[in-house]
Image: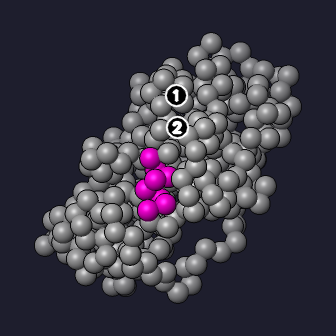
Amino acid sequence: MKSAVRRVVTAGLALAAIVATAGCVESGRGDTGSAAAACPFAADPSVTTQARIGYQAIPNADLLVKDRGLLAACLPNAKVEWSQFSSGADVVQAFGAGSLDIGTMGSSPATKALSAPLNLPVRVLWIHDVIGASESLVAKDKSINSIDGLRGKRVATPFGSTAHYSLLAALGRAGIAGDVQLINMKPDAIPGAWNGGQIDAAWVWDPTLSKLREAGGHIVTSSADTAAAGAPTFDLAVASTKFLDQNARFAVVWAKVQDYAVRQLRTKPEDAAVSLGAQLGIEPKLVGPQLAGYTYLDATEQADAKYLGGGFGGDLRKTAEFLVSQGGIDAVGTEPTYRTGIYAEAAKGATA
């Protein structure tokens, strides 16, 4: 794949200092939600951990956990602080600053965090979702109906994100990586650039994706297609190694709560949509189509040899090989680097 992709950062969009907006959702629900539920298993009052958790507006089990106050219910003596981030790059910066214990980021930022030059002391403890059509390339011009149609066009995506990874994989596969102008934009800045005529297309996720479609955009291809072509992407929960070493019991209960929430997404999607809609600031009826764009894994699947129980280290290393070809990291780490960057104990503990 060509590495000479013309990357243009729009003025005023360079990565700024992180401003965490704890518990800020359009519905007005706070950190523990207003639909507080009882713990679905025996609560553990012995855990007194203080945990700083970073989340993103991605429709997954983490939002259900937050909205229903499940961590407070299952760990009544722990103190949890939730902070919202707009991209995985911001979450990586927070880990670098030592201001976060657990955070959501895509597989590309996670791989970057584990690789040189960052080499952050973090580990992947959960796979929030396997990304499919939820991240897609949307174009304004109806005549653009394939990747080849992007020649000479301006395409926005958040650099370092899973969407960026998928976009570059698609461009490389089509052999036009050097013929497209890529613009680094955070998701919430993309609709304005779209409406203002600064961009022709974007590879992004909801709710931005839906906004662009409402503004007349159409889907050209998706991360499901790039995954089928050999470039899968994921949303992950990453934790600092120090935090995991000192709070193994918290991590297990955290995983049990996530496992419960995943099962709610699978078996009671309409009920789950109420919580996710509240956290995303959208009507519950709009959540269903978003859920269809992801695959959610329960704790047993997470702990399996295909994922955190073994094979996921290979997925991270493959992502690193791609990132180094694009100049995103200095070098691909050794195989043990990515194997030790996985913490399977929490998922395994959640199945006990």
- Amino acid type shown at disc 1: Gly
Element assignment for label 1: loop
Q: Quadrant of the C terminus?
A: top right
Where, by quadrant of the figure, is residue 334 drawn?
top right
Residue 281 placement, left or right of 143: right
* Residue positioned 50% across, 45% down in the render: 317
Q: Main secondary structure of the magenta part?
A: helix
| Residue indicated by mark 1 | 310
Q: In the displayed structure, does residue 318 sit left or right of residue 105?
A: left
Q: Residue furthest top?
A: 352
The image quarter in which residue 179 lies? bottom left
Q: Residue at point 55% right, 40% down?
A: 335
Residue at image position (47%, 59%) is 323
Q: Position of residue 239 (x, y in %)?
A: 69, 42
Q: Residues within 10 Å of mark 1 (few under 14, many from 20)?
A: some
Q: Which residues are magenta?
A: 318-325
Q: Are marks 1 and 2 in contact (CB under 8 Å)?
A: yes
**Residue indicated by mark 2:** 313
Instruction: Classify mark 2: helix, strand or loop.
Output: helix
Q: Which mark is residue 12?
A: none
